[in-house]
Amino acid sequence: MPENFSKAARSPVRHLTRADLFLFLRTIAIGVVGGGIFTVLNMPLPWMMGAMVATGSMTLAKVEMAMDTRLRTLMILVLGVLLGSAFSPEILDRIALWPVTLTALVAYVFVSTIIARLFFRFVAGFDRKTAFFAGVPGGLNEMVILSQAAGGDDRLVSVMHSTRIFLVVMTLPIMFRVIEDFDPAMRTFGASEGGLDVMDVVFLAASAVVGYSLARLIRIPAPHLTGPMIVSATVHLTGLTSAAPPVVLIAAAQVILGSAVGARFAGLTFRDLGRILRLGGTSTVILLTISAIFALTLEAITDIPFESLILAFSPGGLTEMSLVALALEIDTAFVATHHIARISVVVIAVPFLFKLLDRGASKDDDL
């Protein structure tokens, strides 16, 4: 793996200052152009995927990118409210089967982690700590933090997870388009045709603020997304509002999130790209294969559609995969809930699994 990446001076996704304003505006402009091109080409989830490809390509071409973590967080709050609006009373008829799939999800996390760890350790040649956290199908931010705390190469973990998220978000919608003949165009996620009234705005804004505050208070994983989604779901299930954030705001959120993913390839060059894609691509195929096995098995047991299960068990990011489900109109509440559960399992259980596996690996090294 390239030394220049591991030794990159600063993260492109950070708390920006006034001195970074030009870089930030350039990043946004490139993301918007990429999203616009993907929209014209009728690509799946165009604003996020287009922004990812455009900013990622420019980053590899040594054009410096910068994304503000505060703005990214704000957009995640918006998306949390949006995801909550996908919860409707109809899901109550299906929720009885969720304990089966959620239990299987725990097994999926452990099986995927062990197999991907073996790949990164013995095929990619990573040190055992970096190999473990690069292989966990968890959130990028959580894995980078845990890897850093354990003494792994957090930058290497970051690029492997960024590559995985990038490839999963790029490939799954296209696969659905080709195999399932789904319309890939971005849905009009926003409010009803009548627009938002004052009370709609109040309920949606309160869902974001109250949800995030409560989630942080009780330490729920991924509070920026989970908290607003839970409160927004409650508001929508109780019929207080049926509105959702405006489509323009959702498109802007996708551009910002996509640009942040693309910008994380800072420190890499096109020469590095071959090995990055080979390792990241192979690990992604391994994880998606495991996801498909679980999805096919659970479809036979529960009769839940395969497309819902594969998205729920896919190794993409929580925010990104929830957006894919929204764009393809595939049981967003089911998909988002399972990805939240996956992050929870990773945050709670994976540190214990790491200690267990690392202790065993240390003994083997001593022999």
Image: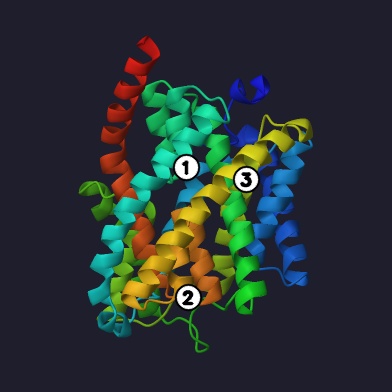
Image point 64% across, 45% down: which residue? Answer: 262
Task: Please tell me which residue lies in front, 199 or 96.
Answer: 96
Which element type, helix, strand or loop, lies under badge 2?
loop
Local secondary structure at mark 3: helix
| Marks 1 and 3, the one that precedes in the sequence | 1
247 relative to 149, above or below: below
Q: Mark 3 and 2 residues: CB-CB less than 8 Å, in contact?
A: no
Of residues 3 and 201, the one nearer the viewer is 3
Q: Is residue 179 above or below residue 362?
A: below
CA gap between label 3 and label 2 equals: 25 Å
Residue that numbered label 1 is attached to: 140
Rendered view: 77 above or below 328: above
What residue is drawn where x is 43% and y is 46%? Answer: 139
The chosen color scheme is rainbow
Q: Who is closer to the viewer here, 210 or 202?
A: 210
- Residue 265 seen by the camera: no
> Residue 359 location in percent, x, y?
30, 22
Q: Between disc 3 and disc 2, whose residue precedes? A: 3
Q: Of the residues under marks 2 and 1, which one precedes in the sequence? A: 1
**Alpha-carbon distance for marks 2 and 1?**
24 Å
Question: Residue 330: which numbered mark, if any?
Answer: 2
Q: Quadrant of the N terminus?
A: top right
Amino acid at dot 3: Gly
Q: Residue at x 75, y 58 (%)?
A: 33
Type of amino acid under label 2: Ile
Residue that numbered label 3 is attached to:
281
